[in-house]
Image (cartoon, helix red, strand yellow):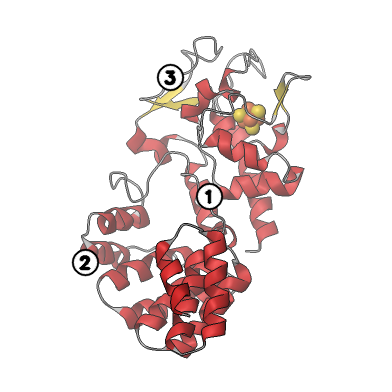
Amino acid sequence: MSKEELFHALADLYEALGAELPVSGAENACGTCRECCTGTGLNLHNVTSLELDFIEDRVGPTKLPSFRRFLQRDGEIAVCPFFDDESWGCGIYPFRPFSCRLFGHYRSQESRLPEVCVFRGQEQIFQTTAYYRAVPQAEALRALVRRYWPYQAARATELRAPGGGGASSEPWGDALEQALFWQAQGELTRALETLAESDLEQTPYVLYCLSLILEGLGLQSEAARALEEALQEAPDCAPLHFRLACNLYGCGRREDAVTHFERTLDLWPEKTEAWALLGAHHLQSGSSERARSCLLRALELEPANSTYEKMLAMC
Ligand code: SF4
């Protein structure tokens, strides 16, 4: 699916969610206290990269940096930058994220609605482990986010998908989340078996995760094959090129690795490690000038890195 097709699918998903949400009393029962759009309501908000990019695509990039900081709970931005003081409501209402749509209707057992919220006491409460079963369209959103991965993964910030899951959580999600959990626990064989026994579609993201597990098991060639397969479907995915470059370099296929490092940097010029590794390669090959230029770029991006400084001194 193209990026635009995924954005359309997300808009359809939002519409389907709206039709499934329990309506409390009046059509819009919200008392507009604004609490859900402030730091107080933040424990209920997580926004996926797909949704952040969708908002950027629909309303422009101006407020995205402050919205990201707001979502990262840095405490400096108390009210969502998309809150509109004049209309006293969401300034991006048609494009607001999934978690904003759920607010008041659903909450996990561990969270609380603000005291003044008119939905308080009427909301559906779910156990965290039952998130995907309890919340309408949550699984569909997870599937879309994974499909979107090749488009967004080059971004520096990735916020946790609503409902959690992933490597640091208990393995209550689907087979991929379970495999990532076992991987994080160091149980790589179990992680591989979990993926092998599942009927997950081999999307680029699934293949990327598989490659990490295979690499951990020392199966470098198999990991490279998984990455090459993923690149057939997502040829412009920088993280795939970077992982493959590292894999090939480790296997001694240096020229192939350089091709993928260079492709990584075409697509993701801020990828500091790619500049540094390419610099290291040129240094070893005796191309001092090329090494210097790559390492200077790495140091520009990460000025205090003593390893890069030492390598540069060797040029
Ligand atoms: S995006 Fe809209 S609904 Fe969500 S927190 Fe911001 S102002 Fe509130």
Question: How far is mark 3 from mark 1, CA to CA?
Answer: 27 Å
- First in sequence, mark 3 or 1: give its number: 3
Q: Mark 2 sits on what residue?
A: 189
Q: Would you say 30 lies left or right of 308 here?
A: right
For image coordinates 46% across by 63% down, the residue present is 205
Residue depth check, mark 3 versus mark 1: number of the one nearer the observer = 1
Instruction: Label 1, secondary structure: give it.
Output: loop
What amino acid is found at the position of numbered circle 3 in the picture? Arg
What amino acid is found at the position of numbered circle 1 in the picture? Thr
Q: Is residue 182 above or below residue 291?
A: above
Local packing at callout 3 (Cα closer than 10 Å; few below 14, some 14-19, many 20+) is some
Q: Mark 1 sits on what residue?
A: 157
Q: Mark 3 sits on what residue?
A: 112
Q: Would you say 216 lies left or right of 73 here?
A: left
Q: Would you say 51 lies left or right of 201 here?
A: right
Local packing at callout 1 (Cα closer than 10 Å; few below 14, some 14-19, many 20+) is few
Q: Quadrant of residue 206?
A: bottom left
Q: Nearer the viewer, residue 106 or 113?
A: 113
Question: How far is mark 2 from mark 1, CA to CA?
Answer: 30 Å
For image coordinates 51% across by 74% down, the residue present is 241
Report the quarter where the N terminus lies: bottom right
Q: Quadrant of residue 176?
A: bottom left
Q: Is label 3 within 8 A of ligand 1 (CB to nearest ligand atom)?
A: no
